[in-house]
Amino acid sequence: MATESPSVRTRVSSTAASVFDRREGSVLVGLIAIFLVGVYIDASRFLLLDNMARILRSAATTAIIGYGVALLMVTAEFDLSVGSMYGVSAGMGAILIGGNAFGFDPLFAVLVVLAFSVVFGITQGLVVTKLELPSLIVTIGTLTLLRGVHRILLGGTTASAGNVGLLKWLGGPIIIADLPFMSGPILYQIPFLHAETKTFGQFSILIVWIFVLLGVFHYVLHYTRFGLHARATGDNIDSVETTGIDPEIVKLGCFALCSLTAAFAGLAFLGRFGSVSSGSGNGLALVVIAAVVLGGTKLTGGEGSMVGVLFGSLVLATANNVLALAGLNVSGWQGVITGGFIIAAIGLDAILKGFSYDLLVSWYAEPLRNLLASPREFFRTRAEQKTTDDTFGFLMLTIGVAAVATNFVAGVLGNPAVASAIGLDVGQFKLFLLGGWPETVAQVYVFLMVLTLLAAAAVEVTTQVFDSPGDYEDTLASVCYGMAPAPLFAIPIVLLGYDIFFVASPVVSSLVASVPVLLLIGWVTYAGVRETHDLPRERALAAIGAVFLAWIAAAGVVALGLSTA
């Protein structure tokens, strides 16, 4: 019997679903999005080969340590001391090679440091497995211990290795002119971006080590008995013992490899700079864990991805590079972005579990389509079928769309050609905080969340007074789905940000432009309150009146604060 081959659309949808079912696919999409932001900000600088090499070099330390951390996390254990081991290893190498009391050969120094890291890792593993202590707590202690050792070794200053010798092969530069079949640096010119020829003369050998160690650890995790035992240990430690696998031995090996990669990265750092300070490695562990979890390694163990570790490291490195291009590298935004990625990484298993195009449709597109068709019908027939995940998912996506719309409109009106064509005289965009898209996103988020919380409080109190049959979940559904028109706030927000006014002042004009949006939100919320709480028209209107009173009171408090500032 002949079978009908699947359509192109079916094959594309199936491929997309398989990509998004893997965490690496989701992180890759995020990496591409950040890459496009960099192109948008300054393509001529961002797309330089030197800048691409800089991103890879920045990701190298995180990725190399991350391979070991991921292998350990597959067994459901943690090591927060890797940042301290990174610093101690670099400090030990500097002292052993360049110290007045030692002056050892760099090869011998490297072997000593790597041997120390393995012994230390095994010792940590013994404390965790034999004393049955939480690895999180144990490695917080060893983090502090190693940090103290590092400061003692360096005396609180900086140590230099002098002639690093062999260490250049761990972290030094590769000169392209010295490579086989190369007679000089690479010459290139990107059409429409560069008016002159650019040169690419060298890159860090760390970039080579990223991919070499990626291949090694990927092979270990997926194609060796040790990797199989590590995954089995993390997946179910209680049942794995019945198969003849000793989970304690597996964990000891993973602790040793985790410390070994941190020491390797520390020696590479020394090979690159030739010296090390007492602050080297501070905060590195959290960044590594963020990259590892972003890349698909489960916090609960049993599953990991070395390719995902590389992607997660590149996401963090590219984000920081883009911030530098945007002039935000010294404004604290690097810490904000990195911290945000860490928070996202910790919750990513829950947020992105089973993420797919269908989930995006069910969370946002389908409810929005039904709300536009008939709010009352939506709340009457569909709202009760939605879980709190659906409700909050819709709210977060609505706020995200509003933030994107605001930045888009601000970008269009801020373009000199557009502003001149429509006769506007716009300056620098500013809401409460002066800045670009990150500040705008943060302020839009706070603004819409405050509106939502005030509305939820007002509806809940009012419906309690009316002794409504509905509960707080009905209130949340009414208010969260009621925020569907929120992206329309992009217009009044941009008016305020650019000091554009058509009535009295920019603030008044922005408030006037906000009235239709607020009325739309009130109308949708009214439909939700009436249907989910089963209230008559008069009481549902009273609940919405309470919402507007709460908003007016909040606006009055803000206006009073601004007037006295």
Image (cartoon, rainbow, N blue to C red):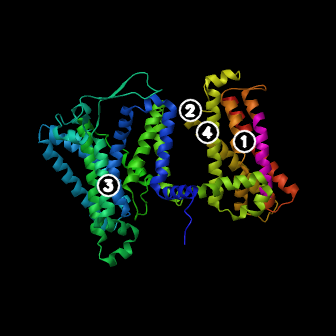
Q: Which image quarter is the C terminus in?
A: top right
Viewer-nearest residue: 333 or 231: 231
Query: Which of the labelled discs sits on residue 554, or is there none?
Result: 1
2 or 3: tag closer to the N-terminus: 3
* Residue 178 % position (x, y): 21, 33
3 or 1: tag closer to the N-terminus: 3
Classify mark 1: residues with Cα within 10 Å, few (<14), some (14-19) or many (20+).
some
Viewer-nearest residue: 445 or 302: 302
Classify mark 4: residues with Cα within 10 Å, few (<14), some (14-19) or many (20+).
some
* Camera sees residue 240: yes
- Give the residue number, with chain letter if any, for mark 4: 443
Amino acid type of the residue tagged 1 in the rendering: Ala
Query: Which of the labelled discs sits on residue 68, or is there none?
Result: 3
* Camera sees residue 147: no
Classify mark 2: residues with Cα within 10 Å, few (<14), some (14-19) or many (20+).
some
Give the SS element for disc 1.
helix
- The Cα atoms of the two marked residues, 3 and 1, are separated by 51 Å
- The Cα atoms of the two marked residues, 4 and 2, are separated by 11 Å
Residue 414 counted in the magenta span: no
- Give the residue number, with chain letter if any, for mark 2: 436
1 or 2: tag closer to the N-terminus: 2
Amino acid type of the residue tagged 4 in the rendering: Gln
Q: Which residues are magenta?
A: 512-529
Give the SS element for disc 2.
loop
Q: Residue at x 46, y 38 (%)?
A: 334
Of tags 1 and 4, which is closer to the observer? 4
